[in-house]
Amino acid sequence: MDKKAFFQHLDERTDIKYTDSGLKIFRLKFPRSHLRLCNVKIDFGSRDVCVRSECGDTLLPYGTAHFLEHLLFWHNGRNLYSDFFAHGALLNAFTTYTDTNFMFTSLPDRLRQTIPILLDALWNHSFDKKMITQEKAVITSEIQTALLNHQLSYHYQLISMLSPASPAAVFPAGRTEDIEALDIRDLQKAYKAAYQPQRMTLFLLGGSEDTEDLLPPRFRIEKRPDHIANRTIISACPPPALSQNIVLGDEEQMENTWTGMQIGALPGQNDLLTAKLYWDIASRILFQLDSPFFQEIQQTYRLEIDRLSAEAHLYEDGGFLILHSQGAHSSAYIDVASYYVKQRKEQIADWLQYGKDSLTDAIIYDSDYVRKCFEWAAECDRCKCSFLDMYGIIHEMDTRDFLFLIDALASSNKAVIHVSQKEAIGQ
């Protein structure tokens, strides 16, 4: 099966329906899988710090979405993890910048018991002041522990240096002062606004059963509405210019460098999924040690770089690229790479093909396949597109697009943290 056929095959296995309450169900079949992966995604994440109602807007402390995630594990005086474990299912939850997720794996014959338990907990929560006090202590400890993770600390520090007002600069669990400020009224308002069926998607991956056969009989299933939603877009305008790049640490000690860059959409192609996929491809070309581009540039310039990795984070309200490089020439790599691309334009097509192949191979052959496939399914759901649409976007990227990304890297606002070799070893 060729790669395009693979993505088309995923679409053929996908069935999207709705319950009469508005809950969206994204069913993706994998006939050979023994377990079923279930995830309920709520459209409420760490960036959502304002609740709108007829009575006016209510500002929420950072970390509200994550706090609710913790509280919802307690239902009718019982812990959901223990209840799921009794059914042979492992339940976990996580909050991202854009949403909150409750995920579990289960044997197929247990889903009719476990799904109603989870949805009941999500839709019928009773707030308990004692439990809120208990979770405040738990989450405060979680925040303090996270701050000890230098990699995590640099990530949010870089975004804060580039865009201090962005919610993306705050750890999803919030800050200590946010947790102290949370009260039961904030939580109740946020819960009432966010935990509605219309703001949820239930993902069911694995097996060959029809959607109806995995759900409790009380759910009335409806077909997909006859409307086409536009993909989410991000601004194609560049971020406001900084007076100068911001640098922390000793520039004479450049063995370990963290660099943050503001990135955005492409002119004329400003849908969010395109931007994410294009930056992913560019990162695989530029920032992977085993890519042909890096191997060639290292040999040409004798670059002493021992570690290189990058992660792009793009949302409707902006985007950032976080680069970690280690070695004597780590801080110079972006400028050298940008210059080298422009000098060897005749090789861009080959480098670009490597990036496209690397991304599609990661989707097709990932060892943790079903879990990773959920992430791509969630991306398709968020951007209202098919798997084949996603393949088409990857395939359509051309040398002009890649050169635009190179120019964006070279001219972007940057924040740099230099970590001395001694500090890096201590981590």
Image (spheres, rainbow, N blue to C red):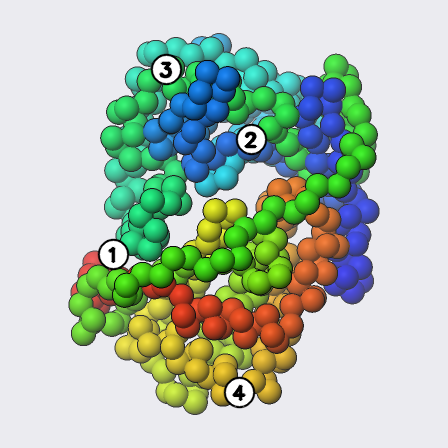
Question: Label 4 to label 1, Cα distance in Å?
Answer: 38 Å
**The C terminus: image quadrant:** bottom left
Identify the residue position indicated by label 4 in the image: 344
Q: Does residue 362 appear in this view?
A: no
Badge 4 amino acid: Arg
Q: Which residue is mark 1?
A: 427
The kind of secondary structure element at disc 1 is loop
* Residue at 43% in and 89% down: 300
Closer to the camera: disc 1 or disc 2? 2
Q: Is residue 387 left or right of residue 333?
A: right
Disc 1 or 3, which lies upstream in sequence?
3
| Circle 1 residues within 10 Å: few <14, some 14–19, many ≥20 | few
Work out whether mark 3 precedes mark 2 in sequence or the reverse, and give the earlier one: 2
- Judging by the rendered image, the residue that carries numbered circle 3 is 184
Q: Which mark is residue 42?
A: 2
In x, y percent, where is residue 98? 50, 39
Q: Secondary structure at mark 3?
A: helix
Answer with mark 3 or mark 4, whichever residue precedes in sequence: 3
Separation (CA) of disc 3 from disc 4: 60 Å
Q: Which circle's residue, 1 or 2, is located before the other in the chain? A: 2
Mark 4 vs mark 1: in front: 4
Give the camera-side residue of 138 and 109.
Answer: 138
Label 3 Cα neighbours within 10 Å, binned few <14 / some 14-19 / many ≥20: few
